[in-house]
Image: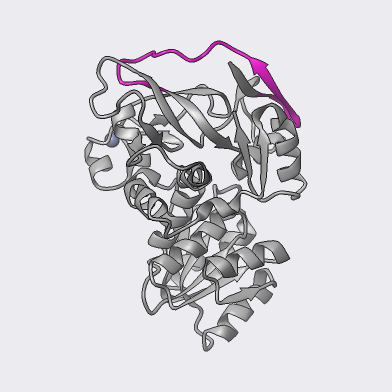
Amino acid sequence: MRKVVMHAPRDVRVEDVERPRIVEPTDAIVRLAATCICGSDLWPYRGADEIIRPQPMGHEYCGVVEEVGSAVRDVEVGQFVVGSFFASDGTCEICRSGYQTGCVHRQPGAPEGAQAEYARIPLADGTLVATPGMPDADLVPSLLAASDVLGTGWFGAVAAEAGPGKTVAVVGDGAVGLCAVLAAKQLGAERIIAFSRHADRQALAREFGATDVVEERGEEGIARVRELTGGLGAHSVVEAVGTHESMHQAIGSTRAGGHVGFVGVLHDVTITGDDIFMTHVHLHGGPAPVRRFLPDLIDRIWKREIDPGRVFDLELPLEEAAEGYRAMDERRATKVLLRP
Ligand SMILES: [Zn+2]
């Protein structure tokens, strides 16, 4: 089969490899209907993250179950399934509390990569959620979005306690930030402020439910949010970037007693005692337990209540993965869908 492998920064190739096989009796093999490139894949692409090379890429996936191990009970061959970037058993106390990404048996969701024709998914019963049937082709991008960016944006909004009567601000206008806007709207937020400088992303943010757009960043951005909220700051702020600057923009935009949901993978962020002691801000985040939300998200997508697949603004054959990485690196695309 064909699979995407990163050999070095900016060196992404599509190679012939053996099809994955069942390794553990709890595994499933999924024939991927679609996969995509994550913003976090750009860190190793730019040389900012050390990885073992050559590194198989990809952790977002949906597709049809091709084979299951002997211990798999709930997932069946032929089902269309959605999973996420960590595999979880679904049975431990942490999983049952809704923090599947903290599962005591947590492991990579697609250990040999998901930018491929087939992927091996560990702990299939705990990790995969089947759709009610075979999806129409136009639903596939949204189901793929559920596997990471939607689930992550949704957790950001939940962690920030977005809800009726709340003003929610979202730092980051990548796919996760845009999905956090969509989530805040679905969760009933009254006002949604999107930080964005890109006209196309602003437009999608407004379609997803943003009521206000702030182009300024840093202290100026914080001042704009305070201006829009009677000097108080937002009740709920989603941080969907992961830099020191964006995290502080999020904390600074939050009112006393408000909540920050941080879901951008943090890189070199320093938070001092003063940052959290004097502000009365709640901080909650981390790798999103996407699995917690998947049944609800699949249901909303199936009923066509939400269309998170709109975040994919470039679709390429898997063979052209290298062009997909370039397009995201050069910001010609927000999120690239790859068709195996
Ligand atoms: Zn668990």
Is residue 7 one of those drawn in magenta? yes
Which of the two residues, 193 or 276, is positioned nearer the viewer here?
193
Compared across the picture, whether 178 is left or right of 328 comes to left
From what the image shows, is residue 11 above or below residue 280?
A: above
Which of the two residues, 321 or 48, is positioned nearer the viewer here?
321
The quadrant where residue 37 appears: top right
Residue at 50% across, 42% down: 140
Q: Position of residue 150 (x, y in %)?
A: 48, 51
The quadrant where residue 158 appears: bottom left
Q: Position of residue 42 (x, y in %)?
A: 67, 40
Which of the two residues, 136 or 63, is positioned nearer the viewer here?
136
Range of magenta residues? 5-29
Ligand 1 visible in quadrant = top left
Residue at 76% across, 49% down: 332
Type of colouring = one colour
Q: Position of residue 93 (x, y in %)?
A: 22, 40
Quadrant for the C terminus in the image: top right
